[in-house]
Image (tube, grey):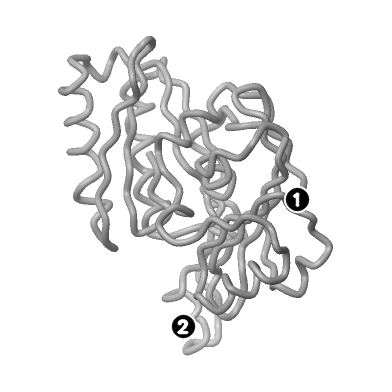
Amino acid sequence: METTTDRLSVALQVAGAVPLERRVEGARKHAAALLPMVGDLLAEAGIALKEIDALAIADGPGSFTGLRVSAAVAKALARTHPALAVWSASTLMVRAAGASPPHGARVLVATSALRGELYAASYRLDLPRRVETLSPPALATPESLHGEAPDLVVADAPEKIVDRLGDQFAVPLVRGAASLPSAIALLTLVDVDGGATRIVDLDGWEPQYGRPAEAQVRWESAHGRELPDPTRDGR
């Protein structure tokens, strides 16, 4: 389940078959659409939920609401199906995998973090064998990325920033809709060395939001005190 952007996607992989996928475009549709999409895919494949042995969800950074929706659904499904293994991978890694880079290519992924900043990470991909995280997801600016030496850039940010990154690195650039993460790309990272990580303590796990929700920032600024925030205290 990939819920970190305005594009919601759900994919299903049955051994020996071509992956199935559903997508919905648009903000604030995730909560209503996610479970029906899961049901549609299971019905198309002719299998029951109890036959699924693994679930993968995209971790942040990304849409606060989208991350909360997928985390809640994953926890609910795991509680009702204790044998279900739950995996997660950064949405930046998912974007890198979805760009289908050449084996061994170094991929720099940059997405908007608002306030003129980026979330950025760098990976060396050799799928389906392994993924090496060269620079983990972190807040960045185009200036702070000068030390990177990518073979490919995947960028989803305001056009001026994407253009600047393209000029800065002078390597192939994946942008626009092609830069968005997908559930099918997420599936390629499950059970891969250095790829998705199996979540052992699902009840205590929270997505990597990157920073507090914008509504929380505004509230704290107006009231002069902090609200509980999963990015600060792990709850």
**How far, Cα to Cα, is label 1 from label 2?**
30 Å
Q: Is residue 54 above or below residue 107?
A: above
Q: How many marks?
A: 2
Q: Is residue 9 above or below residue 172?
A: above
Residue 43 sits in which quadrant? Answer: top left
- Residue 95 falls left or right of residue 47: right
- Residue 149 falls left or right of residue 121: right
Badge number at residue 218: 2
At a point 48% along the width and 36% down the height, the residue shown is: 186
Tag 1: amino acid: Ser
Reading the image, the residue beneath label 1 is: 135
Tag 2: amino acid: Arg
Residue reaching furthest bottom? Answer: 222
Q: Is residue 231 above or below residue 51?
A: below
Q: Position of residue 60 (x, y in %)?
A: 53, 52
- Residue 10 falls left or right of residue 122: left
Dot 1, crowdedness within 10 Å: few (<14), some or many (≥20)?
few
